[in-house]
Amino acid sequence: MIQTQANCQTKCPICGASASQLLSLPKYPVTEFYEPWSEVFVLTGYFDQIVRFCSKCTHLFLERVIDTKFTYSNYKTTSGSSPGALKCLDNLEKFARKHLEDLDSVPTIIDIGGNDGSLLSKFKSKGKKLINIDPNASGPDEIEKLKVFFQEINLAQFRTRQRKVIFCSHTIEHIEDPMQFIREIGNSLNYEDVLFLQFPSLESLIRYFRFDQVCHQHINYFSLNSISILLLSMGLGIQHYEFDEEHYGTLRLMVRRELKKREIETLHYPVNAHHVLQAYETFRNFCTALDLAIRPMFETGGAGFGAGLMVPTLAYNVPTVSKLSVIYDDNQEKIDHRFINLNARILSPNDSFFSSPIIITSISTKSAGRSIYHKLANAGVEYIVLPVIYS
């Protein structure tokens, strides 16, 4: 059962300032939880959510926080099973190699939130120490696995003279106390060490109207300004950064310990509450119009394609998705399952799946939406709905 209680935070977790309530999301669905499909369906996995914004450091965050231990005790997703996640890790590796030319000579590489070891596997070589820190850590035998929850990480043992690189990919947005998390990482870094971070960016969320990617599991939505303030408060500085729209609108950083303190500065175009509200209104208007347009088409049939993690939030914003009876997917681990808050049965594609309208339901990454569209088009599907403003 999904818990219905949550911790509440009204002050900014970055700077401690009071944050204004911007969005109210009543009965918002929990994502990423599947269950075996059966004739009996007990609707669960919803609770009210509030989204707050700190104008002082331009940070967006959730007021109500699910126990992260509960979430990741039940986590079933692996990076290797997600083409979008793998592409994002490929791009992180390219970024790291571009800005750290001697990366292959670094003796110790740590991946915080390393999941199935997909990123660390790219650096396997004789004598190199590879460490995966994740409550669900897995991967090849040569990778050391530390199965601890992120809020319990102790990196003191790694503050040695031996040079190291730390990766942290799509993890910090899940952390309830990002200040303590970055403090722990920062305290382990020597001046020659490097930290590579990537996570969904607030700028991309606004620019591309991707509020369907707001979910209970993503507690923090960092702007370049808010992450810079957090890092600088811990004696860390951003050396390089880039935005990557492939996966959740990623912001990617190369971070090092600062040799001297400097004034906190805004590194990118400003973000304010008006920008968030204006973008959210555009997003909601788009979803309402889309739902009205496709509802008649799907009343007599139709299906979804792609049982990606964020389908429940898509269904929240486009209610026609919540009424689908079938969602097709190529991942065999999901077949004959469903989301705990949607009754659609997940099935393998078959010869008849293209005979009715299909809405693409896995849209968190550009590559996923585009590849599914081409797959359906090549199969001869006559009516295909891609429910995003940009792809």
Image (spheres, rainbow, N blue to C red):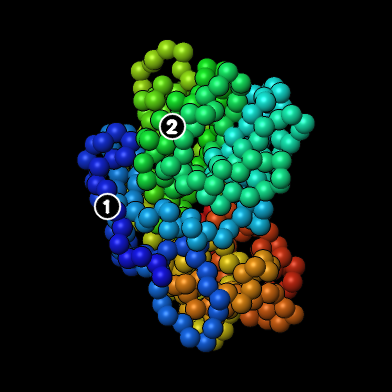
* Disc 2 target residue: 184
Question: Callout 2: 10 Å neighbours few (<14), some, many (20+)?
Answer: some
Identify the residue shown where x is 29% and y is 40%.
12
Residue at the farthest right position: 126
Identify the element where label 1 is drawn.
strand
Coordinates of residue 201 in the picture (x, y in percent):
46, 42
What SS does tag 2 mark?
Answer: helix
Mark 1 — residue? 8
In the displayed structure, would residue 184 be above or below residue 391?
A: above
Q: Position of residue 303 (x, y in %)?
A: 58, 77
Residue at 61% across, 43% down: 145
In-front residue for pair 51/124: 124
Report the Cα–Cα distance between label 2 and label 1: 23 Å
Sooner in the amino-acid sequence: mark 2 or mark 1: 1
| Image position, residue 199 (x, y; %) | 50, 42
Q: Residue furthest top?
A: 260
* Residue at left offset 40%, top offset 73%: 44
Residue 316: quadrant of the picture: bottom left
Percent coordinates x, y for residue 307 in the rendering:
58, 67
User: For mark 1, does the 10 Å Cα neighbourhood hold few (<14), some (14 to 19), or many (20 or more) residues?
Assistant: few
Quadrant of the drawing holding the N terminus? bottom left
Q: Amino acid at mark 1?
A: Cys
